[in-house]
Image: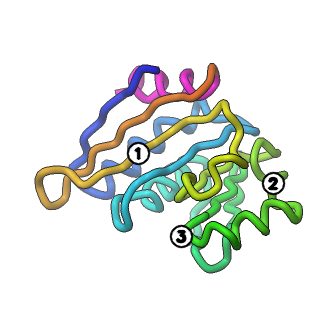
Amino acid sequence: MRTVRIVTTCAHDTEAVAARLAPRIRAGDVVALRGDMGAGKTTFVRGLARALGYAGRVVSPTYTLAARYPGSLPIDHLDAYFGEKERAFLREGGAELLGGEGVALVEWPDRIEDLLPEDRLEIELAFGTRDETREIRASGTGTRGADLAAALEESA
């Protein structure tokens, strides 16, 4: 599995990296967003949402479990920080959001790993060596995920 590495220097740059996915992302895609609190997971979601035409507020849905952002392609933003609540939500019908009519972006995917599709884009965000820098590592766990990771590299 090949990993694409990108360093950003501010939130705007992180959003711009996510926006590069917009032309290639399609319904049914799943993006797993990994990283510590404050690493930029929600910032990444905001960048993709803006690129797909959503102009509203994007916040982490930690307590609501999921949020939908309409645009040219709907985004389903899920937060599995409270793993058992998210597992119950997915078991009770929320699983249709994974691989559904929109693109699903999942924060804290390690807490619901067994419920995620095997073919997905993995994004890991980490704090860089300087205050505002972030390192974004993208890789795919299947054919489609690998194509999306390659798209980030090609558009750099």
Residue under numbered circle 2: 95
Residue under numbered circle 3: 60
Q: Residue at x 36, y 37 (%)?
A: 137
Please check the rendered image and state whether residue 96 is part of the magenta-colored stretch, yes or no. no
Residue under numbered circle 1: 124
Mark 2: few, some, or many residues within 10 Å (few <14, many ≥20)?
Answer: some
Q: Quadrant of residue 10?
A: bottom left
Which image quarter is the C terminus in?
top left
> Which of the marked residues, 2 or 1, is nearer the chain's N terminus?
2
Element under disc 1 = strand
Element under disc 3 = loop
Three-letter amino acid code at the position of disc 2: Ala
Element under disc 2 = helix
Q: Residue at x 73, y 63 (%)?
A: 87
> On screen, 144 above or below 48?
above
By secondary structure, the bulk of the magenta-drawn segment is best described as helix
Horizontally, residue 100 falls left or right of residue 111, namely right
> On screen, 145 above or below 81?
above
State the residue in front, 68 or 78: 78
State the residue in front, 55 or 129: 129
Three-letter amino acid code at the position of disc 3: Ser
Q: Which residues are magenta?
A: 144-156
Give the Cα distance between marks 3 and 2. 19 Å
Three-letter amino acid code at the position of disc 1: Glu
Q: Residue at x 72, y 49 (%)?
A: 115
Is the C-beta separation of discs 3 and 1 under 8 Å?
no
Give the Cα distance between marks 2 and 1. 22 Å
Mark 1: few, some, or many residues within 10 Å (few <14, many ≥20)?
Answer: many
Horizontally, residue 151 falls left or right of residue 99, namely left
